[in-house]
Every structure is written in C-alpha cells, then in structure tokens.
Image: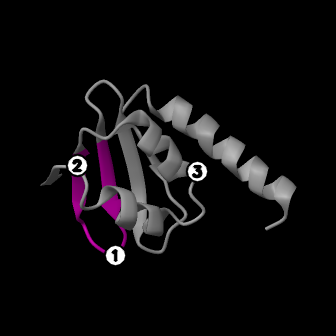
C-alpha cells in the first residue's frame, strides 16, 4: 500500500473510532475472522462479533486508545489476537 493511501486509511479509521466511541453501535470490519466491533467509552466495553458464527464477546476495561489502534490496524485479526483477546476480562453473549 502506498504511503498516501496508508495514511488516508489510518485517518479514516481514527475518524471512525472517534465517532463510534460515543455509543456502543457497531462498525463492520474488514477481516476474515471478525465481523463487527462496537465500543462503549462510558463502560470501556469492546464488543466483537465473529464471522461464520453467532459468537459475540464483550471485552471489559478496554481503553479507548486500544480501540482506536484496533480500528487503525492493517490486520484487525492480528491486532485482536495479540493485544485484546487474552488481555481483558471477557463475557460471551
């Protein structure tokens, strides 16, 4: 990906993160593993819906900065697996 496109992608992701942190609404993800993500800044709860299943997980105590980095990550699945999945208390819905 060229530098300008990469920067634009990051700016768009950060703008989306800022808009979504005000409510727990979900945004569709470009990922082969993860379908949607929502974030509630008030409770610091990140909700992840998985692709190819009905699994929904809530990760508690996730800082807003982690959510923003997640949305800006080139690989959402890799970021999720290394920085979120086993790092925060989780509730399966």
Going from N to C along the chain, the mark reached first, 1 or 3, is 1
> To which residue does mark 2 refer?
58
> To which residue does mark 3 refer?
72
Q: Residues within 10 Å of mark 2 (few under 14, many from 20)?
A: many
Disc number placed over residue 5 in the picture, else none: none
Identify the secondary structure beneath mark 2: strand
Q: Position of residue 80 (x, y in %)?
A: 39, 61
Q: Main SS type for the magenta part?
A: strand
Going from N to C along the chain, the mark reached first, 1 or 2, is 1
Identify the secondary structure beneath mark 1: loop
Q: Position of residue 67 (x, y in %)?
A: 44, 43
Disc 1 versus disc 3: distance between alpha carbons? 23 Å
Q: Position of residue 29 (x, y in %)?
A: 50, 58
Disc 1 versus disc 2: distance between alpha carbons? 18 Å
Identify the secondary structure beneath mark 3: helix
> To which residue does mark 1 refer?
52
Which residue is at a point 41% across and 72% down the rendered structure image? 33
């Amino acid at each position: 990906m060229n530098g300008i496109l990469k920067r634009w992608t990051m700016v768009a992701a950060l703008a989306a993160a800022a808009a979504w942190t005000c409510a727990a609404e979900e945004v569709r993800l470009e990922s082969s593993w993860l379908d949607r993500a929502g974030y509630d800044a008030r409770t610091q709860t990140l909700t992840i819906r998985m692709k190819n299943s009905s699994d929904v997980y809530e990760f508690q105590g996730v800082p807003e900065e982690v959510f923003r980095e997640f949305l800006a990550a080139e690989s959402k699945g890799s970021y999720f697996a290394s920085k979120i999945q086993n790092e925060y208390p989780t509730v399966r819905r």
